[in-house]
Image (cartoon, helix red, strand yellow):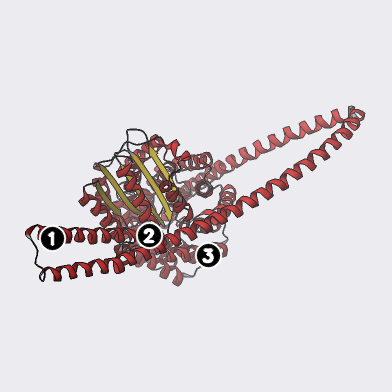
Amino acid sequence: MHKIIVSLVLIIYSLNGFAQQRDADSLINLLKTAKADTAKAWLQLRTGRTLRDVNLATAHKYIDSGFTLSQQLNFKAGILQAIIQKAGLFRAEGNNDSVLTYNKKLLSYAEQFDDKKYIGIGYVNLSESYNDFSDSENALAYALKGLEIVEKTGTDGVKEDTYALLLRLYFDRHELDKALQYGEKALTIARKLQAPEREAMTLINMAMIYSKQKEYDKAIATTNRFIEICNSVQNERFLAYGYSNLADIYLKQNKVELARKNSESGVALAMKTGDKSMEATALRGLALAELLSKNYAQSKIYADSSIAIHKALNNPENVIHTTKLLANLAYATGNPAKGYAYELQSDEFQENYVRSVLSKQSSDLEKKYETEKKEAEIQLQKATIKQKNTLNYILIGSAAALLIILLLSYRNYKHRQKLQQQRINELETEKQLTATAAVLKGEEQERTRLAKDLHDGLGGMLSGIKHSLNNMKGNLIMTPENAQAFERSIDMLDSSIKEMRRVAHNMMPEALLKFGLDTALRDFCNDINQSGALNVTYQSIDIANTTINQTTAITIYRVVQELLNNSIKHATATHALVQLSKQDNKISVTVEDDGSGFDVKQLELAQGIGWRNIQSRIEYLKGSLDVQSEPGKGTSVFIELEMD
């Protein structure tokens, strides 16, 4: 009954519809005061993605706004993510033509940006689209080509999506054992990521395979697990798939009442969420249940409704299946002539569908044949010319052979040199990374040691001196002038103790070690606000309950510390924004100010220790750094790091 469920590669969509709306409201409020920078573009894309399972039309508007702003800012990550999310919205609407267009656009932009990771994703997403158009040859070819790149450059989430796609492709090719193998790989990663939405999508697809293999107990158990996840995250749109799938399994077991009950639940949820394709599928399940219960009139109503929707969505395979159901219904009601007419109609639909698929394949084959034919004619002409000029070719060939040998020898020599230089560069890079790691580690250890010595050593000594002076005060007889000078000395000692503690805290803040990065950054920004040097707004998104390893946390803290110090010392800024967010398996940091700004080309010539420290820390963690600034227009720094 069902075609295996399609899920867009790369993007992880939360299935919690109610939570999505609450999250979207929070993001929309942030957008009201956001500047037109990369952080705002990212917020627009997050808002659109969050609204995907709530309101598709509104989601489109936010994704379009994010794409436009990313193009204006030349924000490559935003451009690529916007294209992927647009394709996801069109897939949810069943608009396969637009999905294919945007997947081609993704690969084009990825190649233009020379981004290996997104090139791999582009191949995998194109495979999705070719599979939608029943081009199984291209679908599998692009999927395997993408898999080779994704397994080298992709995150666990991208790998899981690719395995899930191969599950569906091998299912369509009736290679069910291979499909299940990739399904198990996808499940393993989904559970490792603790991503219930990914686990759910793979479970429902594996349930269909078990059903096809007539392992109905496994199919029911797997579908019930899918329904359990959908209920836990309150996603009604995907819950409809679960109920419809259960109805299909129960129909195969001739459990009509259970099939009817689950089909009714599927129809109600599909209508509520606006999923027309699922509504049509669930209606066909109801039509079958009513047919088996001999409620022929009601069965006809459901079947006609299902066909009307499938025709509107241009789903020829489903039109064929439901038309055959109408034929069976006509036979059951004693109308063989009408039943035969429906059979002819179903055959006609099937012939037209097969003809359209074969026509496209034939067109592709004809183009390939014509190309090969022209190539053969060119080769024949070359052979004729060669025969007429044999002697000349022998003479020219001898000279050319000698020249080729010399060129090949020279090229081989240059190639060996290039390989040697490449290896030297790799060793130098490794050496630099090792040195950077040692320097960063030594620097943090020295900061910790100095902070401890200042706080426990010098701090204790100064506090002891203060205590002794206070004790002496009561035993000394001084003139009023000397008493006043003595009090000023005590006050200066207090100020020295406070300043020493502040320096020790900046060297290694206790909040970072005890309470984590989010709390430490919030305290740091509050300290700057209280000092009056700069008005800093701090925001964190999806960071609560997120564990960040100490090396990454210290690196982010030091980078933010350095960037805000630059805003105070060099940019003469009055306001700044620090935003820390988590998306999938990545940590993003945005630091912006309204200072004097600068020409970003100057960074290539920058000799300052602070900027070199920032670059070396980000490179050490294999992160990405994007700086947007113009003189007089402030500065925006966007950093993205992979979480371990």
Q: Is residue 205 left or right of residue 537?
A: right
Residue 407 in view in this figure:
yes
Please give the label number shown on residue 487.
1
- The residue tagged 3 is 180
Residue 321 in view in this figure:
no
Occupied quadrant, residue 357: top right
Q: Nearer the viewer, residue 244 or 43?
A: 43
Q: Amino acid at mark 3?
A: Leu
Residue found farthest to the left: 480
Q: Residues within 10 Å of mark 2 (few under 14, many from 20)?
A: some
x, y percent for residue 444: 41, 61
Tell me which label, 2 or 3, sits earlier in the chain.
3
Residue found farthest to the right: 391
Separation of marks 1 and 2 at Cα, in angstroms: 43 Å
Q: Which residue is found at the position 55% from the left and 58% from the top?
A: 170
Name the element at disc 1.
helix
Name the element at disc 3.
helix
Occupied quadrant, residue 570: top left
Q: Is residue 48 left or right of residue 206?
A: left
Please give the label number shown on residue 553.
2
x, y percent for residue 605: 47, 39
